[in-house]
Image: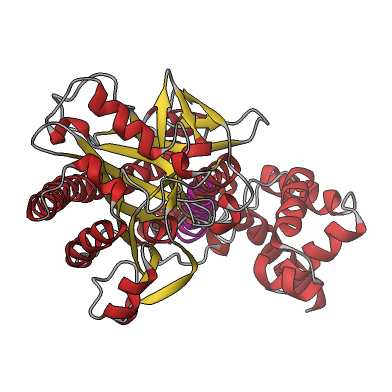
């Protein structure tokens, strides 16, 4: 048994749970990473195209009115007309199932004289209320930023969170995008940014924001545009399969020096885990089995696999943030599943061994036990008590030995009535008195013609008990077999018959 277990351990049979979990998580991870890189790459290209179209539209509008970008601040009417033209472009850009919203922020405000004009920017913000499906009518659109008159003219519903303009603050998506342009780069493919778990405004839900600058032909920065991938859309598109692990989820987050920033992460999957609060830095460690563990400062661990994700072109500048995507679950869930698989394998192994033992026992009863019994018969020379085994070779052997004994047994009926023979007979008769009551009872039944099996049934004893009595009777009466015993019994019967006559 121990040798078999060693072989099973050496062949890795008890690593089935580890292997299955690793393969499942690897497949889910590869699938989601491929989808994220493809979808976010497509959105990035669409964002660059959106930036070019909006920039061209703004420059055309300025040229028609003999204005420069700086003149936007002086004419509220021209700013609203320009946004009206931009609205058509944003509406057309939302005809896809990969983004939840499109927006444009112009580096201008409708009223520069207001106290908070330096943090207010004009623009448009359209959201598709049916994520994961391209909108088919204006009824699915919500108008969150921009002149209310434009929404009324286009019959677009105003959102309850509607405001006239965007509020910008240092360090937000707007300033980070502008700072990329100020670094001297002009290629839009090098300038777009994915902003982790950002908000266009405090009253709007979080999401991944793609931002691209609007750069005029004279290198003037006109503003920022982009797309949003909302929390809801991310969950719909990138939730891993939960057919095996109920609390599995994916996490897309910035990573730096082996630490994921969960405060800026997008997550999709188990609501019970995500809603419990996964926040702050998550330290990444990898064990000898190849599983990665994301451990929070509160020592909460989620385990699975993770992989670096390319959200930017490979030749982009090195200042861009690195991203990683993981498919993980609470460590206890993963550990319990792997243990259950190993216990199942152990149960199957024990069941197999027990079934083999039972089969061996049944085979022994059917084939080996009769052979052992026959060997006992040969040893005791109890050929007359032999029952057929239906094994031809054994039955032939017993028949042959029985014939040999019959031929070799002395025929006391033809012996001379010599003094020696009478002495043996007299000794036999005298020895009968030495038998115990139980032995005498068995002996009497032999005299009546019963065999060992019949005696056992008649006295309600086991055949082994009868064999024990036989051995003692043979020893006390100085006979070597039942055959010889019966010869003396016949002599006693002849003597008694002679005396009676």
Which quarter of the picture shows residue 133?
bottom left
Magenta-tinted stretch: 345-366
Instruction: Left or right? Give the position of 70 relative to 219.
Output: right
Can see residue 324?
A: yes
Across and down, in percent, residue 239 comes to 39, 56
Q: Nearer the viewer, residue 284 or 234?
A: 234
Image x and y of residue 293, in percent: 50, 31
Residue 179 percent across, percent down from the top left? 31, 27
| Image-based side of 262 in relation to 195, left or right | right
109 drawn magenta:
no
Residue occupying the point 48% across, 48% down: 345
Task: Decide which of 42, 416 is in the foreground and name it.
Answer: 42
* Total marks placed: 0
User: What's the residue at 62%, 54% (across, down)?
Assistant: 484
Instruction: Pick the quarter of the image with the C terminus.
Output: bottom right
**Magenta span: chief secondary structure:** helix
- Please name whichever residue, 395 or 96, is drawn nearer the observer in this view of the structure: 96
């Amino acid at each position: 048994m121990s040798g078999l277990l060693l072989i099973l351990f050496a062949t890795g049979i008890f690593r089935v749970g580890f292997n299955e979990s690793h393969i499942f998580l690897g497949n889910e991870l590869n699938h989601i990473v491929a989808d994220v890189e493809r979808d976010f790459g497509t959105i990035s290209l669409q964002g660059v195209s959106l930036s070019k179209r909006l920039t061209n539209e703004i420059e055309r509008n300025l040229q028609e009115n003999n204005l420069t970008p700086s003149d936007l601040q002086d004419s509220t009417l021209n700013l609203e007309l320009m946004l009206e033209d931009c609205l058509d472009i944003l509406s057309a850009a939302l005809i896809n199932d990969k983004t939840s919203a499109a927006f444009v922020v112009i580096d201008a405000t409708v009223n520069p004289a207001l106290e908070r004009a330096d943090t207010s920017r004009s623009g448009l913000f359209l959201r598709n209320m049916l994520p994961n499906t391209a909108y088919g009518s204006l009824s699915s659109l919500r108008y969150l930023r921009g002149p209310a008159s434009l929404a009324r003219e286009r019959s677009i519903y105003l959102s309850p969170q509607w405001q006239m303009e965007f509020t910008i603050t240092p360090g937000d998506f707007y300033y980070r995008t502008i700072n990329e342009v100020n670094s001297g780069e002009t290629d839009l493919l090098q300038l777009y940014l994915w902003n982790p778990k950002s908000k266009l405004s405090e009253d709007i839900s979080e999401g991944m924001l793609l931002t691209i600058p609007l750069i005029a032909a004279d290198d003037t920065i006109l503003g920022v545009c982009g797309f949003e991938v909302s929390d809801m859309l991310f969950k719909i598109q990138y939730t891993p399969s939960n057919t095996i692990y109920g609390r599995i989820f994916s996490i897309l987050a910035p990573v730096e020096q082996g630490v994921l920033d969960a405060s800026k992460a997008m997550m999709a999957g188990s609501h019970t885990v995500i809603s419990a609060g996964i926040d702050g830095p998550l330290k990444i460690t990898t064990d000898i089995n190849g599983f990665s563990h994301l451990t929070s400062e509160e020592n909460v661990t989620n385990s699975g696999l993770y992989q670096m994700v390319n959200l930017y072109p490979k030749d982009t500048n090195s200042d861009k943030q690195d991203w990683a995507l993981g498919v993980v679950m609470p460590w206890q869930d993963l550990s319990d599943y792997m243990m259950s698989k190993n216990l199942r394998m152990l149960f199957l192994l024990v069941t197999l061994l027990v079934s083999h033992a039972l089969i061996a026992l049944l085979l022994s009863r059917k084939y080996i036990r009769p052979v052992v019994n026959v060997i006992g018969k040969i040893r005791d020379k109890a050929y007359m008590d032999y029952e057929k085994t239906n094994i031809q070779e054994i039955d032939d052997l017993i028949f042959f030995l029985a014939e040999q004994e019959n031929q070799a047994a002395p025929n006391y009926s033809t012996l001379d009535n010599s003094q020696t023979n009478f002495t043996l007979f007299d000794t036999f008769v005298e020895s009968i008195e030495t038998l115990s009551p139980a032995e005498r009872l068995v002996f009497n039944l032999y005299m009546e013609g019963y065999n060992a099996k019949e005696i056992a049934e008649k006295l309600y004893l086991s055949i082994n008990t009868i064999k024990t009595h036989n051995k003692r009777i043979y020893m006390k009466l100085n006979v070597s077999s039942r055959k010889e015993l019966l010869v003396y019994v016949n002599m006693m019967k002849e003597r008694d018959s002679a005396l009676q006559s």
